[in-house]
Amino acid sequence: MIGIIGATGFTGRLVASELIERKAEFFITGRNEQALRTMSQDLGGVPFRVIDVQDRSTFKALDGCKIIINCAGPFTDFGEPIVQEAIARRAHYLDTTGEQGFIKLVYDKYHEQAKAAGIVLVPACAYEFAIGDAMGAQLCNDFAQCQSIEFVYSLEEMSTSPGTRKSIVRAFAASGFYLSKGQLVEGRPGALSRKAHIDGKAFSIVSFPAGEALMLPRHTNVQDVNTYFTVAAPPILLKVSAAFGQLLMKVAGDFIVKRTSAKVPSVTERQSTTFLIQASTTISGSSPCITVKGNDPYWLTALIICGAVDHLLSNPPSQFGAITPAMIGGAKLIKELLEKSGAKWIAKS
């Protein structure tokens, strides 16, 4: 039995719909019983259970659950008790976080406990870092000398969900980590910025602490990982605004999270969002790279996490503990799920 935490949220609903398509046995959870009842009816009578991530006394409703999919963010605020519950119940745990700090918490604090319990914990099994993890793994597999990887993310017409907006606040307020010479080095978002040509177009790019810096060292020999996203502003302006922005999030983060708009993207807005992710390295004067292009990141998140769950159900994991998405079925699994969504995976030597 699969349980979805935060099923009535924007991403949770997409995950539930994808599980319906896969004819999976699952139940939905949330803290609002009426919302759950309505959603259950919309999904043809899927079982529901009331669980409040801020009230551990409600966690008994997870009885019988063997795989937990956590879609309830910000994960920095609400995720840790669910991880603890998964370990106590010996249930595999996957989530959709994009918060580097939470990923690091799961890896650093709960790997050994999960390993002893014979389960896997898979944070960030979603659009962005799961894809980057697979791209990095593929580069390292194809090129034995691959020691350094640079990632660039580009999004167009992105309309975000309330959970994403709250997670961005938490992620931006925290000090992050970059991988340099095999060591995690602390650094704030926006510490580096420059001009770059991505897919034949000129962009300003700004650094941000991302999941790949934590994920790839767990299953590859990569020594340096730098991650950027594209923006319209000039690099010099980015350095000033990034420093001010982090201070604002630290001071006013709680207020911003509480006042975040409940507006969710429409189907049209969701589907019109396009993305590009480029992973590149330099080896003996050449610059091998992988570029992934697609649209609808939220649906892709549902596809990735449900595909990972399917794989866990049909292929018991060969290793336990806190692992990365690409460690479930290799880069091949993520690539297949991307292609199913219509995204393009383009490799150049």
Image (cartoon, rainbow, N blue to C red):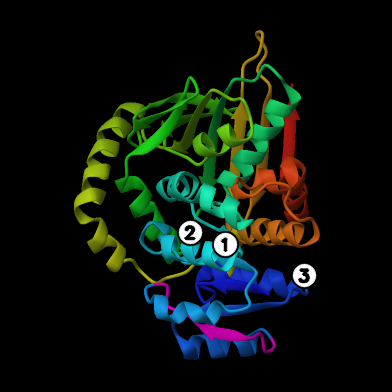
Is disc 3 placed on a helix, strand or loop?
loop
How far across and down, in percent of the image, does residue 252 sit?
21, 55
The residue that label 2 is drawn on is 159
Is disc 2 placed on a helix, strand or loop?
loop
Q: Residues within 10 Å of mark 3 (few under 14, many from 20)?
A: few
What is the CA distance from the residue labelled 1 to the residue labelled 2? 7 Å
How far across and down, in percent of the image, does residue 18 sit?
69, 69
In the rendered image, is residue 3 in sight?
A: yes
Does the magenta run of residues contain 246? no
Determine the residue positioned at 56% across, 89% down. Answer: 38
Q: Is residue 232 left or right of residue 215?
A: left
Pointers 1 and 2 in contact (CB under 8 A)?
Answer: yes
Is disc 1 placed on a helix, strand or loop?
helix
Pointers 1 and 3 in contact (CB under 8 A)?
Answer: no
| Disc nearer the start of the sequence (1/3) | 3
Q: Most extreme residue toward the top, as rendered?
A: 284
Q: Main secondary structure of the magenta part?
A: loop
| Disc nearer the start of the sequence (2/3) | 3
Q: Nearer the viewer, residue 171 or 5?
A: 5
> The N terminus appears in which quarter of the rendering?
bottom right
Determine the residue positioned at 60% across, 64% down. Answer: 90
Callout 2 amino acid: Ser
The residue that label 3 is drawn on is 22
Q: Most extreme residue toward the right, as rendered?
A: 314
Q: Is residue 226 above or below residue 162?
A: above
Q: Is residue 151 above or below residue 340?
A: above
Q: Nearer the viewer, residue 93 or 14?
A: 93
Determine the residue positioned at 59% across, 25% down. Answer: 222
> Mark 1 or 3, which is nearer the eye?
3
How far across and down, in percent of the image, does residue 269 sit?
55, 62
Q: Is residue 63 left or right of residue 1?
A: left
The residue that label 1 is drawn on is 270
